[in-house]
Image: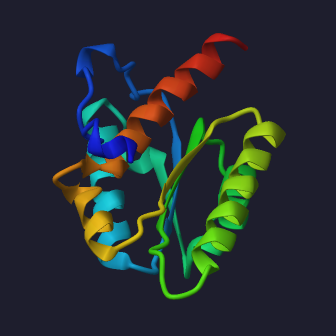
Amino acid sequence: MASAINNLSNYNAAEIPTANHLKFGLVVSSYNESITFALRDACIETLLKHGAKEDAIFMEYVPGAFELPVAAKHLAKNNKVDAVIILGCVIKGGTDHDKYINHAVAQGIMQLNLQFDIPFIFGLLTPNTAQQAKDRAGGKHGNKGVEAAVAALKMAHLLKKNK
């Protein structure tokens, strides 16, 4: 896994553009909340660290990962946000449900990226075990929420610059 090579929380803060004039949508799955809420908290902390205002972060919660794209679309349509960050966690179980859910969510997010003129950031963990999820939600591999926030900042600036 890529996060075994690179810590998800490591980045050069000097290379990150300011967020003080940006608005963000954040969609979080409540399923596996001990993981997803750790992703959420790290994401928000990173956005605030780079100048985002608390009232410029619009949050929606959904029951599970499958519902993430539709909530992200709703949030983008009803709020003037510069980026939408999508956070969830689907842990492999005894069936192949994870493959179907992960593929559907990835496809949904890709469609949103092509449909809207703002970035939709894929922050869905797809681990094989609960321990792998914990390792990527503040554990030994850092926190995917930090990585998602950094990606949102970079992409929002890129798309605004090229308008």
x and y percent of residue 27 in the render? Answer: 53, 61
| 52 horizontally vs 84: left or right | left
| 93 horizontally vs 82: left or right | left
The structure's colour scheme is rainbow
The residue positioned 30% from the left and 64% from the top of the image is 132
Closer to the camera, 126 or 56? Answer: 126
| 12 horizontally vs 123: left or right | left
Does residue 69 appear anywhere in the picture? no
The residue furthest right is 115
The residue positioned 24% from the left and 35% from the top of the image is 49
The residue furthest bottom is 94
Q: Is residue 6 above or below residue 55?
A: above
Does residue 3 appear anywhere in the picture? yes
Closer to the camera, 58 or 70? Answer: 70
| 107 horizontally vs 26: left or right | right
Q: Quadrant of residue 139?
A: bottom left
Which quadrant holds the C terminus? top right
x and y percent of residue 141 in the render? Answer: 23, 49
The residue positioned 36% from the left and 59% from the top of the image is 40
x and y percent of residue 103 in the render? Answer: 68, 62
The residue positioned 29% from the left and 58% from the top of the image is 41
Closer to the camera, 142 or 46? Answer: 142
Q: Quadrant of residue 14?
A: top left
x and y percent of residue 37 in the render? Answer: 33, 68
Q: Is residue 36 above or below residue 117?
A: below
